[in-house]
């Protein structure tokens, strides 16, 4: 690996993304919340110490700490609040270099901790590329370099002896190589960066943070990676456009997606729907417009908007061109299986995205979700076909697989001594014929500026799965987060409005499906769910979405494990935890009516 230990999540995914998301949210706190709650600023002389603990000297910044670096009375690059908060005469300014350094320092500290943990647990770490040369043999590609004393990807000595053989055999193998970003299939696509590159970029604007203007960023894609990156970059002061060919956040509840996208638009992110990139090229000073419009190092991007996004320049739609400092490709990820030699290991793969790199995921057989076509080779994480592409799912599958392998080993030992093995694989109390991880009980959160968390089915999925609106009942409601209430009309940006949606399968419809009866009356779609209606999906848009959803996900999982789904009456009969945003989930009351606008009724504050 060219990274340290920890994979995509730690090095270029969840961890740096969440930290930069936090940095972006601070912009709203400084501009809106701080003055509303009584915090004001004043110009602080260079020689004077900060008057408040929030500006106390820190490890970074060099001028009174990281926050004090924001109190620089220069032309702001935030694009909002140019005169500073009410009562102050300074402008907020963000330093990308400071943020990048802090994030990368934390990532490297995690790399080191993982390395120490492996060593403490007696796990041998070999930082080599490997490929199968047979059903039970792996060849190490970089053994010669390591023998010569080269360092591993995390900057630590590998510590392996120089005479180490370049082939390894084992009773079982686990393929967990994850995925890599899909490149843009256009002329000059290699000039774009990906989310794997974003968090360690040296600069966003050619010439550094003080080039005198906001960084212009074009994000290509409409999935959660694209929207998360676009949102945090807008929050950090960049001028961000999102070019996407199809619906945003496909597979997520579209009522909720509409609210997320609407907030992002009000926050300054520009969307270019039904847009297909045609080419990217690097501008020179000699180009038309010179450095005033483009600038040395800027990227000239051509696209077509409308017309279905297909064909060459003449096939419908309207062509356009613009200049950007960064083009970020977020059009999907492909399994990193090219060169693994899976065919030599008798492991079948399934086709990836047409014409986009290797993209071949490992075919999974059996109910558990980890077995490949070779009984001694397992696959977990994004590389496994059909698996949820979420780090916690891969972590849980790895834990359960380890228990399974240990159980099998113990069973073989008992059998060898004439005994009888037994027990539940993994010790989780799961049904033997079900998947180890239930995908309908896994929570996920999209860390956009207005966060969105969900578990279970979307309204669209429920309607499709259960046969139409007669079988599905939906409760929804909007609310104002209490923590935003004092801001009121002082807000310089969009106002956060939370939203809750509970998707239920009507009890009568469920009973009809179970008994194959056809004479049972089905409820009207606009009726409020009955006590016995089954909760099959829960969606929350608002602050701290991940913190809100985790507990509700446990409730849904426990019900599914026991074969008795969580009932609407059980959820709505719970006593609210006040005052929180999470309480809105158990307070929502109004049914969503067919054909009505998805604004949702306001929920009372107490």
Image: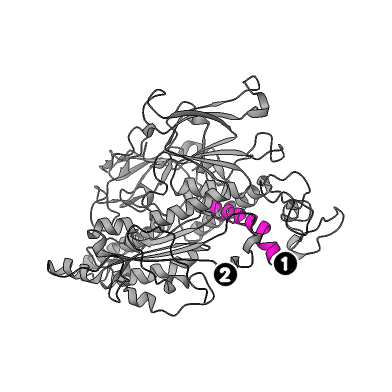
Magenta-highlighted residues: 16-37
| Horizontal and vertical percent position of residue 58 | 73, 58
Q: Is residue 62 left or right of residue 326?
A: right
Judge whether residue 156 can be spotted in this image: no
Residue at left 79%, top 54%? 89
The answer to whether residue 548 is above or below residue 293 is below
- Which colouring convention does the figure follow? one colour
- Closer-to-camera residue (362/427): 362
The answer to whether residue 389 is above or below residue 524 is above
Q: Is residue 72 left or right of residue 14?
A: right
Q: Secondary structure at mark 1?
A: loop
Q: Secondary structure at mark 2?
A: helix
The residue singled out by tag 2 in the image is 482
| Horizontal and vertical percent position of residue 99 | 65, 50
The mark nearer the N terminus, 1 or 2, is 1
Disc 2 packing (10 Å; few <14; some 14–19; many ≥20): few
The residue singled out by tag 1 in the image is 38
């Amino acid at each position: 690996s060219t990274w340290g230990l920890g994979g995509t999540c730690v090095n270029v995914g969840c961890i740096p993304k969440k930290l930069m998301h936090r940095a972006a949210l601070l912009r709203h706190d400084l501009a809106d919340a701080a003055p509303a709650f009584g915090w004001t600023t004043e110009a602080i002389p260079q020689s004077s110490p900060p008057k408040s603990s929030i500006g106390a000297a820190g490890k970074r910044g060099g001028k009174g700490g990281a926050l004090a670096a924001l109190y620089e009375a220069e032309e702001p690059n935030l694009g909002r609040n140019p005169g500073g908060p009410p009562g102050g005469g300074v402008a907020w300014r963000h330093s990308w270099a400071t943020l990048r350094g802090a994030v990368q320092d934390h990532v490297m500290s995690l790399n080191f901790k993982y390395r120490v943990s492996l060593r403490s647990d007696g796990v041998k770490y070999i930082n080599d590329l490997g490929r199968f040369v047979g059903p039970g043999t792996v060849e190490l590609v970089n053994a010669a370099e390591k023998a010569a004393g080269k360092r591993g990807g995390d900057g630590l000595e590998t510590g392996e002896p120089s005479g180490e053989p370049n082939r390894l055999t084992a009773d079982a193998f686990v393929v967990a190589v994850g995925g890599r970003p899909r490149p843009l299939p256009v002329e000059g696509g290699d000039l774009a960066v990906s989310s794997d590159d974003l968090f360690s970029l040296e600069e966003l604007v050619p010439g550094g943070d003080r080039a005198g203007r906001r960084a212009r960023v074009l994000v290509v894609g409409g999935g959660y990676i694209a929207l998360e990156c676009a949102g945090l970059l807008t929050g950090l002061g960049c001028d961000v456009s999102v070019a996407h060919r199809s619906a945003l956040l496909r597979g997520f509840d579209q009522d909720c997606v509409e609210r997320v996208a609407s907030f992002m638009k009000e926050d300054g992110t520009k969307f270019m729907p039904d847009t297909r990139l045609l080419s990217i090229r690097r501008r020179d000073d000699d180009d038309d417009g010179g450095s005033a419009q483009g600038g040395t190092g800027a990227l000239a991007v051509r696209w077509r908007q409308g017309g279905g996004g297909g064909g060459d320049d003449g096939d419908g739609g309207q062509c356009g061109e613009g200049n950007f400092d960064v083009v970020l490709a977020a059009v999907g990820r492909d399994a990193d299986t090219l060169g693994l030699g899976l065919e030599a290991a008798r492991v079948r793969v399934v086709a990836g995205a047409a014409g986009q790199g290797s993209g071949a995921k490992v075919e999974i057989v059996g109910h558990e979700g980890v077995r490949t076509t070779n009984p001694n080779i397992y696959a977990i994480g994004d590389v496994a076909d059909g698996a949820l592409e979420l780090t916690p799912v891969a972590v849980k599958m790895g834990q359960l697989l380890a228990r399974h392998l240990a159980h099998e080993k113990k069973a073989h030992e008992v059998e060898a001594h004439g005994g009888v093995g037994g027990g539940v694989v993994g010790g989780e109390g799961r049904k033997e014929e079900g998947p180890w991880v239930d995908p309908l009980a896994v929570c996920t959160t999209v860390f956009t500026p207005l966060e969105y968390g969900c578990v279970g089915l979307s309204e669209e999925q429920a309607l499709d799965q259960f046969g139409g609106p007669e079988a599905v009942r939906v409760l929804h409601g909007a609310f104002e987060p209490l923590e935003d209430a004092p801001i009121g009309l002082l807000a310089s940006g969009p106002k956060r409005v939370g939203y809750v949606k509970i998707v239920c399968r009507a009890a009568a419809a469920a009973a009809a499906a179970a008994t194959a009866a056809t004479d049972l009356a089905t409820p009207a779609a606009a009726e409020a769910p009955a006590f016995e209606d089954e909760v099959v999906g829960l969606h929350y848009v608002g602050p701290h979405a991940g913190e809100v959803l985790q507990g509700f996900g446990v409730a849904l999982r426990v019900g599914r494990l026991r074969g008795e789904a969580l009932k609407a009456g059980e959820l709505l009969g719970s006593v609210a935890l006040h005052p929180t945003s999470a309480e809105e989930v158990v307070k929502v009351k109004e049914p969503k009516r067919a054909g009505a606008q998805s604004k949702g009724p306001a929920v009372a504050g107490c």
